Every structure is written in structure tokens, then in C-alpha cells.
Amino acid sequence: MRNKISSIASFKLQFAFAVLMMLFSGNLLTAQIGHSHEAWEAEAKISYLTPFSYTMADNISWDLKNGQNDIIRSGNGNLSDYTFDEPGKYTLNIKKNASVDSNIPDKLNITVSPMKMVFDMSSVIISPSIIGGRPTNGTTLTVNVDFKSYDGSSAVYNQGFISSGIGTTITGNLKNSPVTINQGKTVLVFDLQGQASSGNYISFHFKDINDEIQSYDLTYQIP
């Protein structure tokens, strides 16, 4: 009988402990759910005088502030083709539904560079032509770039490019690097290395003065 009573008492203690654990776990779960949304920020970089867009759902409202914390634009849904006329720091404050729009930051910190560099892909010249399976040593790629800076100053450029596509290892190194680029047009020449396979399309990816990528798709298959 004493053993039976001891067993019952032990069971009651275990049951009480289990209930306490369930209550504790429930409170912990509630606390976690209550604090599941934490504000987070993201970063973006763009050149001045370049249209900027950011995709958001129609039920999301936002405001765009400059470095002096003045609202320069506000709205709902997408921010489309806004051009920053002046370099500096800007903030896109996003008012969202956390349970639905968790992939969108609460704040986007935008750095607007005072330099703008655009590769004129229509001016690309490759000489001699790339032949599949052959090293490109001795081949050059020439391209014009248009450069503009907010204060009218020049800049030093020393980047190269890489390629993508099936069977390509081609890279480009800037000839006579570094090159000073001034306001307006500058001609850049790259020495090629590596090779590509025949019958494939490839692309070249240039890095501009702001470390952003601008791509050029070769319009023909490598012979």
C-alpha cells in the first residue's frame, strides 16, 4: 500500500512538473512570438543622376529623406525612377506589415556617389576576333566610357572585367593601368587573357568607378 501511495505521489509530482514546463514553454513561446519582428536595415549604392527604383507592394507606404532628415518624397507601393541630383546619404523609411513583408527592410540606407561612369557598349571593338579554343593573348577590347563628377574633378580608374558563359575563362586587364578619366568621353583598352569554347555565347562584366557591374553581351556565337 505504501508503495502504491508513493507511486501516486510521484506521479502527481511528475504531472505538476510537466504542467509547469508546459506553462513556462507557453510563456516563452508567446514572448518569442511577441518579439519576432526586429527592425532591420539594408544598404544600396547608386551614382548621382541615375534613376533609382525599389519594388514594394501597393499596401506599403514609405518616405524618402535626405541627409538633413527632410522628406523629399513619399508614397505607396513602388518607388520608381527617382533621380538623385546631389550625392550624399539618403534614407528610405518603409512602413510595412511585418508578417507579410518580412523580406523587405524597415530602412534602406542609400549612398549616392558623386561620380557617374557609363560604358558605351555600342562602341566595343574586339581585335582580333575571339576564336573558340584559342588563347586570347594579344587580343584587345576597346570601349568608350562617359564620365561625370559632381564637382567636375577627374578620377583614377584601374578595374578590369570578367566573362561568363559556357566554357569561357576570358578576363580583361586594363592596359596602361591606372588611367585618369576626365569629364566626358575616355577610351579604355583592355588586354584579354584566357579562352572560350566554340559555339557558345558569352558576356563581359565591367566594374565601374563605383565598383558596380555593367555587362556587355557578345551578340554572336564564338566561332
Image (cartoon, helix red, strand yellow):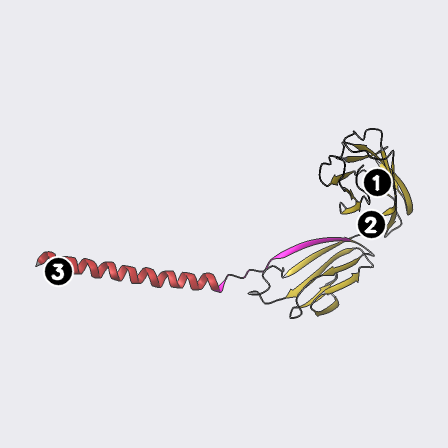
Mark closer to the observer (3, 2): 3
Q: Which residue is mark 1?
A: 156
Dot 3: within a 10 Å radius of its alpha carbon, few (fewer than 14), some, or many (20 or more) residues? Answer: few
Residue type of the residue flagged with mark 1: Val
Residue type of the residue flagged with mark 3: Ile
Q: Which residue is mark 2?
A: 115
Residue at 50% in and 62% down: 35
Residue type of the residue flagged with mark 2: Met
Residue at 42% in and 61% down: 29
User: For the residues marked 2 and 1, what is the alpha-carbon distance in whole angstroms?
Assistant: 11 Å
Residue at 69% in and 57% down: 109
Judge whether residue 162 can be spotted in this image: yes
Dot 2: within a 10 Å radius of its alpha carbon, few (fewer than 14), some, or many (20 or more) residues? Answer: many
Q: Residue furthest left?
A: 1
Judge whether residue 67 can be spotted in this image: no
Quadrant of the rendered structure where residue 140 is? top right
Q: Residue furthest right?
A: 184
Q: Nearer the viewer, residue 194 or 206?
A: 194
Q: Which residues are magenta?
A: 34-46
Callout 2: SS: strand
